[in-house]
Image: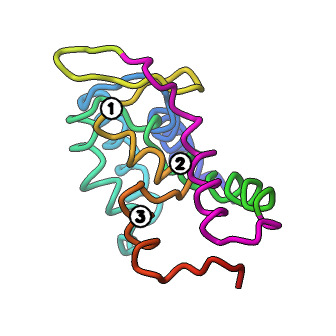
Amino acid sequence: MFGRFQKLVEKMFILLKCLKSQKKITEEDFLEKLVDFIAAWDETFPDCPEFNKLHLLKAHIARFIQKYQMCGRVSAESHESVHAHLAKVSKSCCKMVSTTQQNQTLYARALVNLKPGVAITVDGEEYVTLISGGRIPRRLSVVYLYVKHGIAPDDWVKAFQDSGLLSETKV
């Protein structure tokens, strides 16, 4: 009964391993795996309309890999894991009376993920070392903190504080 899916599953496994890999990949290597997968998909599901994630895979991922030579290192998993981290940090701040103090504490705790002053320069671009051991371009450090922890940059926080929208008392 499941025999017709065997080839598709084998090609999908090879493609997904490539997509999840933390190693650099070439566009040609990716396209070879993608073409094999699409052929197996079309053979298994000849009348199936293209859905969003299949379209993304077929039409957009190759350009991203061509530009950055990677895919797995920038997957959404780290972004999705932020929810558990935020819940843990929020719980530790929930008894604080001041909303402003809560926000400042949450933001300060997010900043500990970057090692201040620990940076290298490669091809004219400065990279910040993360506590986890990785590196990111310094110009993306604010975005990293926002995506990793859901913590807004300082200027956003200040704008909210200055606007009077945040109360000094916990609501």
Of pointers 3 and 2, the one earlier in the residue sequence: 2
Circle 2 sits on which residue? Answer: 148
The front one of 125 and 12 is 125
The front one of 83 and 33 is 83
> Residue 105: x percent and y percent?
64, 53
Establish if 26 lies above or below 63. Answer: above
Circle 3 sits on which residue? Answer: 158
Establish if 65 lies above or below 153. Answer: above
Q: Amino acid at mark 1?
A: Arg
On screen, residue 49 versus residue 166, left or right, reads: left
Residue 32 located within the stretch drawn in magenta: no
Distance from label 1 to label 3 (Cα)?
21 Å
Of pointers 2 and 1, the one earlier in the residue sequence: 1
Establish if 125 lies above or below 7. Answer: above
* Mark 3: few/some/many CA within 10 Å (<14, 14-19, 20+): few
Residue 138, which numbered label? Answer: 1
Residue 95 located within the stretch drawn in magenta: yes
* Mark 2: few/some/many CA within 10 Å (<14, 14-19, 20+): many
On screen, residue 146 versus residue 107, left or right, reads: left
- Choose mark 3 or mark 2, whichever is in front: 3
Residue 69, which numbered label? Answer: none
> The residue tagged with tag 2: helix, strand or loop?
helix
* Mark 1: few/some/many CA within 10 Å (<14, 14-19, 20+): some
Residue positioned 22% across, 23% down in the render: 125
Bounds of the magenta span?
A: 94-119
